[in-house]
Amino acid sequence: MYNKFVMVALLTLAPGAWAQGLQGLTEADVVKLALERNEVSAITKNQIEQAEHRLKKSRSYLFPTLKANASIQKFYILPEKRLPGGMRIDGAEFTLNQPIYTFGRLSSGIRMAELDKEMTINTAKATVGEIQKAAKALFYNAAFNKYLLEIAQDSLKNANNNKRALEERVQFGRINQNDNIKMQADVATREPLLYEAQKGYQAALEDLGYFLDTDVASIKDINSKSLDIAIKTFEEKSATGLVDVKNAAKQVELAAAQESVAKKDYLPTVSAFASYMPKHTNLGASIPGVLLIDTFVMGVRMDMEIPIGGAKTYEKREKVLAKVNADLNLRRVTREVTKKQKSFIQQYGHLADKGKSLKRAITLADRSYKVALASFKNGNVSQLQLNDTEMQLTSNKISYAQNLLAMKMIELDLERLQIQGN
């Protein structure tokens, strides 16, 4: 029973590793290194810059637009004998157009770009939070694997102590040969468990090397005590300020702005314009009915576009539905974030209480094992009873390590969930 329990714990938990730590680096240092080396972190920075450019682009539509074109034409009057070879006409047109009133479409476009930038910044915060969460999870899980390795080492050490105690009893003729063989077999079964624990810890370090894009040989030992630190205090925060809910709320604003633009797209655009149109010919002559002089035109114009196929109508309906979906998504995200936050805090509190009990259980099991070992030397305790006390001690250590890891994972979930948005 003992061997099966320890083997299952080491085989199923140790290899499933996230690791963290380089030589001389703290947890914070490794998180910083992960953010520097992770491609997603660089992508988010570029996305923020892209959003800034989109905002500047939307604002630029408030300023005049200059349009220019040029043409070269060959002009003939038939029959050919009236203008042999034709006449070349060089022309150009320069038009300056300044929007005066767009019924809110330009201001709505700027607001959409502002919301886009704010959402991109929030998304970047969430992304950085995910990278930090992964980096810390690597660190804590590596510490957990190291913890299991130390437990396996202690278990083998205890088994050897049991064997030496048995050898002392053999000298006094207090046991039979069968008990001696059983003790040797018990020691032999601990060695594969130690090997599995070492393999799991190495796998954790290799995971770290992959995550940080570095050679695993450069990764040094990790302190298992990093897992066993002071219990943190978490308080429930208002869901409306958390980054995930903030982004969902801004998505509602964005959908509302898009809906407003779609509804106003039926309305005209009023703008001022000025055009300069020079035309010249290499003949220096004028032909009746053909204007070959420079002209300048200025005025106010109103443009209105109504697609006969109903494209704008369908666009408006699509944006109305998008706004409805954004409202529904905000309700869903708010509910889920609120529920998760409460659940994580409750789970963390339960695990903290459980950890205190497990720590006391380890202390008591250690005392019990030491007493049993001394009694076994005197022949007052059987080999089975001694193994049971050692099994209880190791079992409690593994349970405590598992509880610590579970607490750390919930800590990371809460830290990520409680990131504040803009």
Image: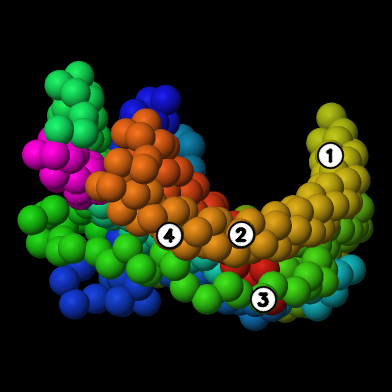
Q: Nearer the viewer, mark 2 or mark 4?
A: 4
Distance of label 4 from label 3 (alpha carbons): 32 Å
Q: Give the label on residue 367, or none.
A: 4
Label 2 packing within 10 angstroms: few (<14), some (14-19), many (20+): few
Distance of label 3 from label 2 (alpha carbons): 19 Å
Residue at the far top: name it.
Answer: 178
Instruction: Say which label, 1 or 2, has the lower sequence index.
Output: 1
Which residue is at the front of the view, 156 or 322?
A: 156
- Residue 170 highlighted magenta (yes or no): yes
Magenta stretch, main secondary structure, is: helix
User: Looking at the picture, which amino acid does disc 4 mark?
Assistant: Arg
Secondary structure type for disc 1: helix
Label 4 packing within 10 angstroms: few (<14), some (14-19), many (20+): some
- Which residue is denoted by mark 2 in the rendering? 357
Q: In the rendered structure, which segment of residues is drawn in magenta?
A: 157-172
Distance of label 3 from label 1 (alpha carbons): 46 Å
Distance of label 1 from label 2 (alpha carbons): 58 Å
Q: Quadrant of the C terminus?
A: bottom right
Secondary structure type for disc 2: helix
Instruction: Say which label, 4 or 1, has the lower sequence index.
Output: 1
Instruction: Say which label, 3 or 1, has the lower sequence index.
Output: 3
Q: Give the label on residue 318, or none.
A: 1
Q: Is residue 291 above or below residue 387?
A: below
Horizontal arrangement in the rendering, residue 21 relative to residue 292 (left or right): left
Distance of label 2 from label 4 (alpha carbons): 16 Å
Q: Give the label on residue 233, or none.
A: 3
Instruction: Say which label, 4 or 3, has the lower sequence index.
Output: 3
Can residue 193 be seen? yes
User: Looking at the picture, which amino acid does disc 3 mark?
Assistant: Thr
Instruction: Say which label, 3 or 2, has the lower sequence index.
Output: 3
Q: Nearer the viewer, mark 3 or mark 1?
A: 3
Q: Is residue 19 above or below residue 227?
A: above
